[in-house]
Image (spheres, coloured by chain):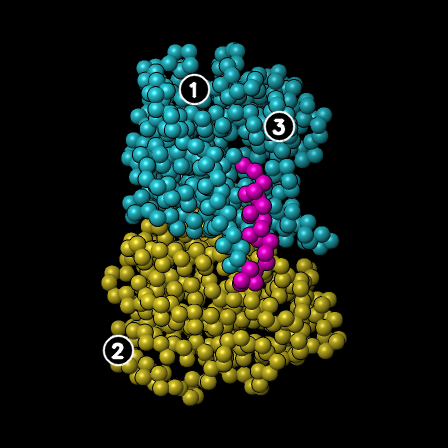
Chain colours: A yellow, B cyan
Amino acid sequence: MCGPYQPVAGPDAGVHDPVPRAADTRRAPGPHWKVTAMTALVHTAEPIDLTVVRDQVEQVVEEFLAAKAAAASGAGHPPEVVRILRDFLASGGKRLRPLLCVVGWHAAGGDEDPAAVLPVAASLELYQTFVLIHDDIIDDSALRRGRPAVHRALAARHVGHDSAARLGAGEALLAGNLALIWCQELLHTAELDTPRRAAVHRVNDTMLAEVMFGQYRDLLGTERLDDDIEAALGIIRYKTAAGTIQRPLQLGVAAGGGDEETHRFCTEFGVPLGEAFQLRDDLLDVFGSPDGRSAPGLNDLREGKHTVLLALAMAGAGPGQRVRLRSLVGRARLDETGAAEIRAILEATGARDGVERMISARYDRCLEVLAGAALPERATEALRRLAVTATQYTA
Amino acid sequence: MCGPYQPVAGPDAGVHDPVPRAADTRRAPGPHWKVTAMTALVHTAEPIDLTVVRDQVEQVVEEFLAAKAAAASGAGHPPEVVRILRDFLASGGKRLRPLLCVVGWHAAGGDEDPAAVLPVAASLELYQTFVLIHDDIIDDSALRRGRPAVHRALAARHVGHDSAARLGAGEALLAGNLALIWCQELLHTAELDTPRRAAVHRVNDTMLAEVMFGQYRDLLGTERLDDDIEAALGIIRYKTAAGTIQRPLQLGVAAGGGDEETHRFCTEFGVPLGEAFQLRDDLLDVFGSPDGRSAPGLNDLREGKHTVLLALAMAGAGPGQRVRLRSLVGRARLDETGAAEIRAILEATGARDGVERMISARYDRCLEVLAGAALPERATEALRRLAVTATQYTA
């Protein structure tokens, strides 16, 4: 298995799937698909250069934070606060959200100077920084992107202090808050007319609240190991699907003055792709990637996250396997031997293959939606590339 | 001692005070004061009815949160999240910030329908909810407004669970984030023209970041018991002074299209009054109020907060008293006997009186600034009342 649309043998029986199944557009493309694909062949002489967009977005964030660092220094504030955020942003990430935002702006017909959409796109990196820093505090995760999580790194500065962990968590909480506050400030600097500004805020305010509710549900779902696939999908939908694909795309559409239909496209395209993104992420967390760039991990298993992967395993497990899963999953000190046993059950029950099938179905669905949408070809072509990025096997 | 401007005998020697001292305006009022006071006597037939404003603000917040509760219920989100915020808002608070905001709007000459400023004012209650919920998580405070702090109340729902405290803190963190996100959403709904909207966001974004830095400095200052009064004032200035008086007032001025001079007035009036507010709060926390409505507490002493009160005590203490303070302050299990010993040292070193003098000086200063400002009389008169509210001896 090496691609997002790698077909997996066997039926998808027993998997509750609220997203309507698409016919496989690769094997039997519909008329829209053909037209779009052929037009794209003619017009993609100037595809959207996502590398350039990525650089532009990074420059906006970096200039914004450089100004914040200078202001903090002038006010005598502790310098590490801004440094933490800059280091975090520099430590990785695909910049998927800002790229989707800029492509959304093109999808809405935005062809003028992209300066207006860049602060909107860049704000999404600060938003994501906020979400991840807080998420790591909530789960008390040790690592993020292979480095100590922010609250752990800050706690290490208080080594020897009785309250080192509490101080580090408090400082990280405040640094995360600043990332959210600055995400909004960056949005407020975007030069948009009143209707577009209002539309951008509607999308952004919706997204932020959705993600908070998703994280809340995720937290409540911890250590509730059962076969409720619908509940697991509900968590995904709010916690990551909306905030990863649908809303970032809609933010760009809103900034570009897109119509109702283009906003609706973002939902139809974004929800299945966002789910596929998270399902891939769940597989990566437990099994790593075949190319070795992402190592198999223990986080989700130790935390006992209510993932679709585990719900499928519980649904397909025999009594003995269920007992073992209940015993092993959610153990804070789960070791590699225990993890290997869980992984074997995830394979034996067909849960891993089931998740692969769910990813494929969702990927197919979003391609079908894309093919049926009357977007500018440059946007269609870029979204096809981003759909691969969002679901492929690299961390 | 029963009022904010109760004079305290003795010189103010040794107290580093970066706010320029005012002549005592009560004993020797300057010409501005006289004129304003006399004009006010003529024109205050229609003072701003702060009780009505308060009701209006509470209605805006409550309607906003009622809509959020309905939406959350429709989406199948856990109902307690919105309920927590509504209960928190209903549990008390002087609504000082929204009142200042509305008065700021009048100060800027706002005489039209106040509908435009009400969402701005109401957003400040959500902002304050956010700040206090997170502050209680950071300090792991047991109580807020005489009831269990939000993270403690949420943890109690998981009684018997190994991770009850962590779950409660995580849920409260997310609920606090929602309060911030909704504070901004409420702001975004205010019907303001582009320059006023931009001005409102500039003030609000500045305030939010200032408070985060202030909380961060407060956290770093914990358990650093020394006589650095300037450091303690620096914490106050960012953590509460700006976010309690200056910026809320400026938010209203911005919404009302106020000029540079009116914004400057907010700083000159708001910084000393904000400091006086926090100094009063520090005294209330340790000594309670003479009317018994606020009981003497242990929070600040147990946390070892770097307050001006303790810095003054360290500055005035003899060697034996210093040793006792270092031994007692910051003890997580400090009992009433220990607290009584600290209070006796705070009295004996003159620290309590010193703080009273600092409050008086700042109160006088803000009255002087108010007397010299050419604001509409209704605004001047209301600010005089709010200056009392902000510094008086009730919690």
The numbered mark 3 sits on a residue in which chain?
A: B
Q: Where is residue B380 in the image (x, y as percent from the top left)?
A: 37, 26
Magenta-colored stretch includes residue A42: no
Q: Which numbered mark, 1 or 2, is in the foreground of this view?
A: 1
Q: Which amino acid is tagged 3?
A: Arg
Q: Which mark is residue A43?
A: 2
Which of the image's four quarters has the N terminus of chain B?
A: top right
Magenta-colored stretch includes residue B76: yes
Q: Residues within 10 Å of mark 3 (few under 14, many from 20)?
A: few
Q: Position of residue B120 (x, y in %)?
A: 41, 43
Residue at 25% across / 66% down in the picture? Answer: A111
Residue B171 vertical placement versus A76 (above, below): below
Where does label 1 land, which residue? B364
Where does label 3 land, which residue? B293
Q: Where is residue A118 in the image (x, y as percent from the top left)?
A: 32, 58
Residue at 47% across / 64% down in the picture? Answer: A242
Q: Are the residues under badges 3 and 2 in a single subunit?
A: no
Which of B18 and B130 lies nearest the eye of the viewer? B130
Q: Which amino acid is tagged 1?
A: Asp
Q: In which quarter of the image is residue A126?
A: bottom left
Q: Residue A12 carries which label?
A: none
